[in-house]
């Protein structure tokens, strides 16, 4: 079967199966002492865990069976081409530092692009048993009680009222990035560090107003784009372009604060 | 009854009752849109939530009934003197920024000092249903499954091997603090931001090796001291003194890395 056009509901149905399968495989390694590889060799520190590889293996196995003609882009095992318009963009453990330090703010990201545009996305946090996903024009959050509820971003007209987060100030390594972030931090109502993918989901659910990050890869952001957009938010690059390629990312719950922040991030 | 000498077990029994009562009172306000007061007036941002006040009220009510002659020092309602040697040092929501942004890394801190020295402590996270406490010479972690397991800090002989965390780089406001932190960050294996009290519990459970913070209040640290010490760790000021007074705090899972970090933090 060549799947030229699938409904979002069908894609999300598959995403639930993938998350159901990857969660236990990854969780086995959470808060267990595992040897931490160093992907980057002697320079820098880029942790990889057994959980990352176990999660991606399970997801790829299921995708190969369910949608054999879809392409896959995964953090661990790279790109597998397909003949359909769809690419599954997956990161088994987004937030490896959170994972390594035992903080339950990492997540499994499962996104789908159609001709390069993000059309469906899911974040699964198997330890806290939370899952959030886009389904057409609605974003749902399922908590430990198993009930799925629609969520929406919060109104936030100005940066002065905004709850701002970023995973780490050390993301800002290129010229102008750090000073733009510092400028936003001074103007925002409050700033909190840490969060990875989980923070973008909290933005979709109305608890965070602005997230600015840099140096993201496509698999760090693709799954989150439909989650944010279907909840009423907006996510772009720091220049206001489509975010699917990663890089410098700006996510906001309210288009008004997005316009205000964009003036700072695009003028570096 | 004048309680001159209570066992740690008796104090922890009370702490369980307090956490059982405060958890639901606080959780009602988590991830709900609540007006955020500004304790610091027009300067700075120091969020207070209704949850903070609701939690402290419940804890004080129970303590007044269970140990009427004990003193209480709480974040929200200040100091209530007592005639016994014991002071309950409580922070209903440690990590108010985490709380406000919806991240489940805040916690309820319940500590006890005897003649000024921390002798019992508990951290309760009612959303993830995790609780950690010291009981004599053992620290226990209870997860969502309800089973309590003893935990220990991890061996970490050198800073080069250490997982370092701090809640925010913006904690370091005094001269020399920021440069000491940057020096530690460059030398450590990895650094992660965010965590508040939850990070100290992860250190006690062997997932983090070094935490350095500054500007802490007694109620931010007292409950965590017995948790870390009974798990095999060490927590002091940046000068190696007892930590009960707060200020600049250094917590390590291994005495060897503590000695190495202390050379940096005490030489500013």
Image (cartoon, coloured by chain):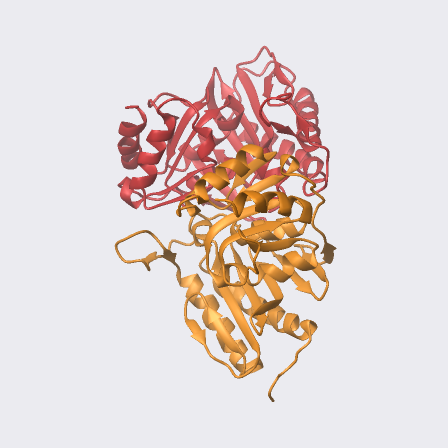
Chain colours: A red, B orange
Instruction: Please tell me which residue lies in front, A55 or A171.
Output: A171
Total labels drawn: 0
Viewer can see residue A104: no
Q: Residue furthest bottom?
A: B1
**Position of A266 relative to B191 (above/below):** above
Q: Quadrant of the C terminus of chain A?
A: top left
Q: Residue B266, percent across and down?
A: 53, 48
Instruction: Please tell me which residue lies in front, B72 or B103.
Output: B72
Residue B2, quarter of picture: bottom right
| Residue displayed at 41% across by 44% down | B170
Q: Residue furthest front?
A: B267
Residue A7 left/right relative to A157: right
Q: Residue B64, percent across and down?
A: 51, 80
Residue A103 left/right relative to B255: left
Q: Residue A197, percent across and down?
A: 51, 35
Instruction: Please tell me which residue lies in front, A150 or B260.
Output: B260
Q: Quadrant of the N terminus of chain A?
A: top right
**Position of B167 relative to A13 (above/below):** below
Q: Residue A12, percent across and down?
A: 55, 31
**Position of A207 relative to A93 (above/below):** below
Viewer can see residue A97: yes
Residue A185, quarter of picture: top left
| Residue displayed at 52% across by 18% down | A5
């Amino acid at each position: 079967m060549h799947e030229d056009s699938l409904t979002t509901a069908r894609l999300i149905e598959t995403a639930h199966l993938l998350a159901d399968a990857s969660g236990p495989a990854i969780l086995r390694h959470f808060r267990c002492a595992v040897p931490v590889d160093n992907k980057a060799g002697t320079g820098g520190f880029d942790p990889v865990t057994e959980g990352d590889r176990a999660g991606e293996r399970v997801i790829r196995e299921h995708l190969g069976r369910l949608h054999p003609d879809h392409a896959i882009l995964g953090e661990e095992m790279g790109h597998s081409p397909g003949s359909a318009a769809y690419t599954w963009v997956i990161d088994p453990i987004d937030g490896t530092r959170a994972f390594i330090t035992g903080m339950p703010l990492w997540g499994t990201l499962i996104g789908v692009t159609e001709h390069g545009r993000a059309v469906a996305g899911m974040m699964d946090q198997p330890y806290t048993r939370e899952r959030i996903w886009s389904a057409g024009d609605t974003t749902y959050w399922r908590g430990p009680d198993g009930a799925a509820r629609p969520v929406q971003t919060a109104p936030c007209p100005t940066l002065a009222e905004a709850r701002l987060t970023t995973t780490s100030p050390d993301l800002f390594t290129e010229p102008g990035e750090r000073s733009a972030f510092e400028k936003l931090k001074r103007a925002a109502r409050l700033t909190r560090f840490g969060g990875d993918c989980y923070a973008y989901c909290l933005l979709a659910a109305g608890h965070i107003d602005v997230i600015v990050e840099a140096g993201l890869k496509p698999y760090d952001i693709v799954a989150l784009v439909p989650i944010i957009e279907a909840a009423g938010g907006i996510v772009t690059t720091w220049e206001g372009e489509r975010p699917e390629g990663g890089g410098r990312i700006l996510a906001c719950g309210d288009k008004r604060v997005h316009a205000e922040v964009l003036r700072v991030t695009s003028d570096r």
